[in-house]
Amino acid sequence: MEYIAYFFIVVGLIFFLGTSIGLLRFPDFYTRMHAAGKGDTLSTVLILVGCIFAVGNQGDLNWILALKILLIINFVFIGSPTATHAMMDVGERAGAKPWNKKGENK
Amino acid sequence: MADLPIWHYDTLFLTLALLFGITALAMQNLMGAAIVFGAYSFLMCLIWTTMGAVDVAFTEAAVGAGVSTVFIFATIYNTGVSATPNSPRIAFKIFAGLIAFGTGAFLLSALPDFPDWGDPKSPVNSTIAPYYIANSITDAHVPNIVTTVLADYRGFDTLLETTVVFIACIAIYSILRIDNAKSKVTEPDIITSPPAYDPTDSLIIRQASRIMVPFMQLFALYVIAHGHYSPGGGFQGGVILGASIILLSISFDLKHVLQQWTEKKIMILTALGVLIYAMVGLACILMDGVYLDYAALDSVLPGDEAYARSHGILLVEIGVGITVMFSMIGIYINLASNGRFDRGL
């Protein structure tokens, strides 16, 4: 059980690393938001799933803890992509140009 | 966790907090500074958590990192994003620097007089804290000692804290509120121009907040009612309730919220919370107790005297929650609509 928890948390951290690299390295606003929105959501959910497995040895009421973490996962899953969508939308209205092959921010 | 001394975490978090603080002050773009300031608040929240002060951490997360960031954003939205660097005369700079350093040196000079970190012989730990720890359960059947201290042993403090929140809300109203019909002041363009982006357009944002708001409110009620057993209480729950309404007014429209919660309702309910708190105290006097001694209420509340104190704590927490919730809503609406109550962010 403990090793399953470690597995999920480590995989989540790897995705977080990818998110950070993508956020810094991608060429324009949209691709950066894409990295942040997708990677952030997935890695947070994975780490929280790892936490669900980690609460297995917390006593009698661990199923309540697991349920609460499930609810948090639900909220992250709804909230984080919505926030990304809002920022994308604002960026589009503010006139951020998508990157193309000919030149940056043409 | 057990191997590492706690000050390793503290050193890490404090260094980061210092870094974030300096960054927030140095940034010229105020929006960026506000975001960094939110991160700073969140670090403070982590510091409280490592110290074991979970209630304080909860408050910091809800107020510092959550709602106050929204307040700062609302203010920036109405005043402009970039900081205009004003260059005062050199003498004034030296004067201000002297005052800052003098105050800092004065505060640091008091540092050696503090007891050591976690010293069991310090006055706080040797006189009154053991009483709270030993008697919280027998006095009020409340396992979360922080709640007992906050609402029962030090009920006067909390009553006045709630009053401070109320007064802050009143002050914001009296400074910012403008009656559109009577006002002759013309506003600069930056304030009267319609918002470039209207989030009410977006179906996704509306639906997502429509799903989340009821759960936020349910959670807030749980935080208020369950404050006896877990971190939380009136302040935290009230802030979350207020934040749920603020989320509604951001994702829908300010008008949409003001249809349900008119200005009059918000003002009355802000005052009602403090009134509930004060009236519970007055009821204790009428039942032959002293002010805010909930044990005197045991003839009207179910259970014995200890349970009467537990229920009295719940009553005042509800009062605190109502005041804090509507103070947050009132402050937000004033800041976001520049006191005109016509449109939000």
Image (tube, rainbow, N blue to C red):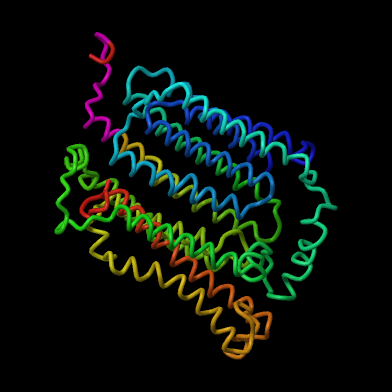
Q: Is residue B76 above or below residue B330?
A: above
Q: Nearer the viewer, residue B230 or B162?
A: B162
Q: Nearer the viewer, residue B244 or A82?
A: B244
The residue under the point 27% across, 59% down is B257
Which of the 4 quarters of the picture holds residue B262? bottom left
Left or right placement of residue B8 versus residue A9 in this view: right
Q: Which residues are magenta?
A: A88-103
Q: Residue B288 in the image: x percent, y percent?
A: 63, 89
Q: Residue B102 in the image: x percent, y percent?
A: 62, 33
Left or right placement of residue A4 versus residue B264 in this view: right
Q: Is residue A101 above or below residue B62?
A: above
Q: Nearer the viewer, residue B258 or B341?
A: B341
Q: Nearer the viewer, residue B157 or B1?
A: B157
Q: Residue B276 in the image: x percent, y percent?
A: 47, 76
Left or right placement of residue B304 versus residue B190 in this view: right
Q: Residue B139 in the image: x percent, y percent?
A: 72, 76
Q: Is residue A91 magenta?
A: yes
